[in-house]
Image (tube, helix red, strand yellow):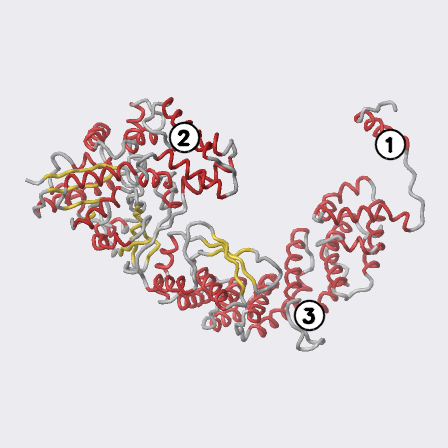
């Protein structure tokens, strides 16, 4: 006669994990059935060589976006059952609905694994009553999480499996599972029947507490379960182990596990004796590492406070709420930032799992792992700042790898603003996330190495009909940053064809800066960029031909938008060399175009003012003062004059500080406006001068204040009558009224 023990657990529960391990050592089962995808049975033998947190990843070859994860932490009851079975030679079988069926059903959500399936608090709360909430309410608790911790997690490993089964049976009385849940439980029973038929004497089943009533007592006829499972859609699913993070275990959506404190749970599992004292001592160490003064006396008082709070609240052990309140009041002295530090470092934690070299991987994953070792870039869960000097071979290879991964959609590294002005430096923020493995699997068909896959990806993007001109120029830049010369010919050919057909000059202007930067990177990084110079000159020539037409008949918004493109092209042209000679150089051709446009009478004031400033700064004008005088003469509308001033002064006010004539022209025009005219142009002027740095505004004010004395004129008289009211108010404030 076979003996079946169904152990209902809370997924990722440290108390449940200890209790399962202890119960298995007492039962000594002949086979262990665990809630999870049966396709992973062959991967169980790898578990002892893995470092949790890890997850089972199921995906469909050729369509890896259809995927699911089953995460495990060291404190997961299923993980402890796996370790017990592998260390004692006990067969382990997963008994949930196969991933081949779950991934094939597009109408359902991704298959629930140990991160949510069967978890009493988390599984499909919209489809059924929350059983833990019902039991907690019956026990007088307003927080289901706290009730579960008090009756299960804090019992020191003595989890009452029989009591949990009885409670779940009471809650499920009269409950009818939906189609998806019914199929899952039918497959669990099917696996259990198969184990019974094979003659195993002692069978242990590890599943979410919610499913216990469906697996105990008289089972329904096998024919009924087979009918439920007949005709299910099916796909080919492949499974492997991937690293996981505590940050993902703490997530409430996506692939998260629905627990908010994985670091605390890990502590409860790893430190069953004196957990409160050890936790608060660790919190003190974290604060000391940040330079905050925390003494042993602080730790002792915080432990006393946590225990007192637990006693007042009738709890068997101080929980996370009590130790957090104690740490806030004593260790952190009420400082919320210090509490947040403990939350980030300890309550959630920064642990990243690790899988062994023997784990099944696609060649792309394996190549990345080899490169990470060669380049000494270790994947980490927390943000890590990385400064790269492109003049060093090792750093240059690191930059190439990170840029190639970004092309593949693997955002392990996020580029930041490089410190210093040199073009040979890069700054990256590195953070490894579990979904990066899925992205690598998704692009596995592109190549067996990161370089080959990134090059193929670039070619695919270049060949897409929807690729815009700006997208292609950005792609050229990415290929150079990633050192993919094999991909450049195809991308450049697509870019040349697109540029030849695009008649919108703004598209060309938006695309040119990236092309110029790409050409520049070809020099800085030592990467050849043949063909770029020809395309850049061709695009610039077409811009110079089309720009005079594009500046005609613009409203305020269109003028402002075009001006951004003009500034970007002007900055890009400054990066181009003048090796071809002054007469035919890109800079000369661009300046001739701007000079010709600036002399037109039909320009928007913003455009005319900005072109005047660009030409003045480039040494191409010597009559800027006369142009300003004409723009602000009485014959011009105040709004147009204000737009001219905005365009001319955009980017900095030092010109007004060092050129008294221009400052005087602006000052004279402004003081000559009527009240109504001043009100109309004030928003434009505030936008212009508000963008200046405070020292620039101060310097302009000082210049205006001293302008009268510099010219030998007497300071203007003060209107005593108008100032009398203000003077009286100030004297009253300082206590000298009537003085």
Left or right: 136, with 400 as reference point: left
Which residue is farthest left? Answer: 1
Residues packed near mark 1 inside 10 Å, few (<14), some (14 to 19) or many (20 plus): few
Q: Are marks 1 and 2 in contact (CB under 8 Å)?
A: no
Please tell me which residue is depicted at 66% across the width and 66% down the height of the picture.
574
What residue sits right under mark 3 in the picture? 587
Please tell me which residue is depicted at 38% across the width and 45% down the height of the picture.
246
Front residue (pair 713, 259) = 259
Q: CA distance from mark 3 to mark 2?
A: 72 Å
Q: Position of residue 578 (x, y in %)?
A: 67, 74
Please tell me which residue is depicted at 81% across the width and 59% down the height of the picture.
627
> What is the number of the mark on residue 537?
none
Q: Position of residue 142 (x, y in %)?
A: 36, 25
Q: Quadrant of the C terminus?
A: top right
Point out the tag, 3 or 1, that comes first from the N-terminus: 3
Left or right: 536, with 203 as reference point: right
What residue sits right under mark 1 in the picture? 723
Please tell me which residue is depicted at 43% across the width and 64% down the height of the picture.
375
Secondary element at image label 1: helix
Which residue is farthest bottom? Answer: 580
Residues packed near mark 2 inside 10 Å, few (<14), some (14 to 19) or many (20 plus): many
> What is the number of the mark on residue 303?
2
């Amino acid at each position: 006669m076979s003996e079946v023990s169904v152990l209902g657990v809370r997924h990722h529960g440290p108390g449940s994990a200890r209790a399962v391990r202890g119960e298995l050592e007492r039962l000594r089962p002949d086979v262990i059935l665990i809630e999870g995808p049966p396709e992973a049975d062959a991967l169980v033998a790898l578990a002892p060589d893995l470092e949790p947190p890890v997850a089972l990843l199921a995906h469909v070859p050729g369509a890896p976006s259809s995927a699911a994860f089953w995460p495990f932490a060291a404190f997961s009851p299923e993980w402890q059952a796996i370790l017990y079975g592998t260390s004692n030679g006990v067969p382990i079988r997963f008994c949930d609905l196969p991933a081949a069926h779950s991934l094939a059903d597009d109408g359902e959500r991704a298959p629930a694994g140990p991160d949510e399936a069967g978890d009493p608090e988390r599984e499909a709360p919209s489809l059924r009553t929350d059983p833990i909430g019902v039991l907690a309410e019956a026990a007088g608790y307003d927080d289901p999480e706290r009730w579960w911790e008090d009756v299960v997690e804090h019992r020191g490993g003595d989890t009452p499996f029989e009591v949990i089964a009885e409670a779940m049976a009471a809650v499920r009385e009269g409950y009818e599972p939906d189609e998806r849940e019914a199929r899952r439980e039918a497959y669990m029973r099917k696996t259990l029947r198969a184990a019974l038929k094979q003659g195993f004497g002692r069978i242990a089943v590890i599943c979410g507490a919610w499913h216990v009533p469906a697996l105990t007592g008289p089972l329904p006829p096998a024919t009924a379960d087979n009918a439920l499972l007949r005709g299910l859609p099916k796909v080919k699913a492949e499974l492997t182990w991937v690293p996981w993070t505590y940050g993902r275990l703490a997530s409430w959506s996506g692939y998260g596990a629905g627990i908010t404190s994985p670091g605390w749970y890990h502590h409860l599992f790893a430190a069953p004796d004196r957990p409160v004292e050890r936790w608060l001592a660790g919190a003190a160490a974290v604060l000391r590492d940040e330079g905050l003064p925390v003494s042993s006396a602080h730790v002792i008082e915080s432990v006393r406070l946590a225990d007192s709070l637990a006693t007042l609240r009738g709890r068997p052990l101080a929980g996370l709420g009590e130790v957090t309140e104690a740490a806030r009041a004593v260790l952190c002295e009420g400082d919320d930032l210090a509490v947040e530090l403990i939350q980030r470092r300890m309550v959630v934690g920064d642990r990243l799992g690790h899988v062994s070299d023997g784990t099944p991987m696609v060649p792309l994953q394996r190549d990345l792992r080899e490169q990470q070792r060669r380049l000494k870039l270790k994947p980490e869960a927390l943000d890590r700042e990385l400064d790269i000097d492109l003049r060093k071979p090792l750093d240059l290879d690191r930059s190439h790898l990170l840029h190639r991964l970004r092309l593949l959609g693997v955002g392990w590294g996020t580029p930041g603003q490089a410190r210093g002005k040199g073009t040979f430096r890069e700054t990256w923020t590195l953070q490894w996330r579990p979904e990066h493995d899925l992205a690598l699997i998704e692009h596995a068909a592109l190549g067996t190495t990161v370089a080959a896959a990134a090059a193929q990806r670039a070619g695919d993007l270049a060949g897409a009909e929807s690729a815009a001109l700006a997208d292609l120029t950005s792609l050229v830049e990415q290929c150079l940053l990633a050192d993919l010369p094999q991909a450049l010919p195809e991308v450049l050919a697509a870019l040349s064809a697109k540029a030849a057909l695009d008649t919108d000059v703004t598209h060309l202007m938006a695309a040119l800066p990236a092309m110029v930067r790409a050409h520049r990177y070809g020099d800085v990084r030592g990467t050849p960029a043949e063909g770029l110079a020809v395309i850049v000159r061709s695009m610039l020539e077409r811009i110079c031909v089309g720009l005079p037409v594009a500046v005609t008949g613009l409203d305020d918004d269109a003028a402002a938008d075009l001006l951004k493109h003009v500034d970007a092209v002007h900055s890009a042209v400054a990066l181009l060399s003048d090796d071809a000679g002054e007469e035919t150089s890109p800079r000369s051709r661009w300046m001739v175009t701007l000079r010709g446009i600036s002399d037109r009478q039909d320009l928007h004031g913003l455009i005319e003012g900005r072109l005047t400033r660009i030409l003045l700064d480039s040494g191409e004008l010597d009559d800027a003062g006369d142009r300003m005088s004409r723009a602000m003469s009485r014959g011009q509308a105040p709004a147009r004059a204000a737009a001219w001033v905005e365009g001319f002064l955009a980017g900095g006010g030092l010109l007004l500080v060092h050129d008294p004539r221009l400052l005087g022209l602006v000052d004279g025009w402004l003081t000559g406006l009527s009240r109504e005219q001043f009100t109309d142009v004030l928003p434009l002027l505030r936008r212009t001068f508000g963008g200046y740095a405070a020292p620039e505004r101060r310097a302009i004010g000082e210049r205006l204040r001293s302008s009268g004395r510099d010219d030998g004129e007497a300071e203007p008289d003060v209107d005593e009558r108008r100032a009398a009211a203000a003077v009286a108010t100030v004297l009253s404030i300082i206590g000298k009224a009537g003085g």
